[in-house]
């Protein structure tokens, strides 16, 4: 299912369009005091979003991916 991720970017709002069926896994990580949401896709490509690796963002993202009725999520907006 095609889903949209909206995040706050330096120049405004950035949107990423992803096919949830192509997501192999995701997790949060911390590095140098920053948290990241890392999303891996079939074929090994990944999307690393700075500032969204906290437990609340991870939980919201997990619910978003599992819910077939929800097609958009706003992180940090």
Image (cartoon, rainbow, N blue to C red):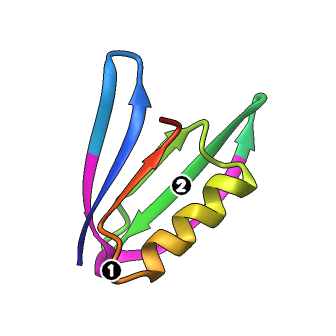
Task: Pick out the residue farthest to the top.
Answer: 11
Relative height, residue 63 to residue 17 (above, below): below
Q: Name the magenta segment's main secondary structure.
A: strand
Question: What stretch of residues is rendered in magenta?
Answer: 16-29
Q: Is residue 24 magenta?
A: yes
**Horizontal relation, residue 48 to residue 27: left or right:** left
Q: Is residue 43 magenta?
A: no
Residue 17 position in % (x across, y down)? 23, 56
Residue 49 position in % (x across, y down)? 49, 42
Front-most of residues 74 and 11: 74
Which residue bears the numbered disc 2?
38
How far is disc 2 from disc 1 in space, using C-alphas? 23 Å
Q: Marks 2 and 1: CB-CB under 8 Å?
A: no
Residue 48 position in % (x across, y down)? 48, 46
Q: Residues within 10 Å of mark 1 (few under 14, many from 20)?
A: few
| Secondary element at tag 2 | strand
Residue at the image point whose x is 58% and y is 62% from the top:
60
Which residue bears the numbered disc 1?
69
């Amino acid at each position: 299912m095609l889903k949209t991720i909206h995040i706050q970017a330096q120049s405004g709002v950035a949107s990423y369009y992803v096919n949830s069926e192509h997501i192999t896994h995701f997790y949060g990580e911390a590095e140098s005091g920053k948290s990241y949401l890392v999303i891996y896709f079939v074929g090994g490509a990944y999307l690393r979003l700075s500032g969204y690796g906290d437990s609340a963002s991870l939980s919201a993202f997990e619910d978003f991916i599992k819910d077939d009725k929800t097609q958009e999520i706003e992180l940090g907006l």
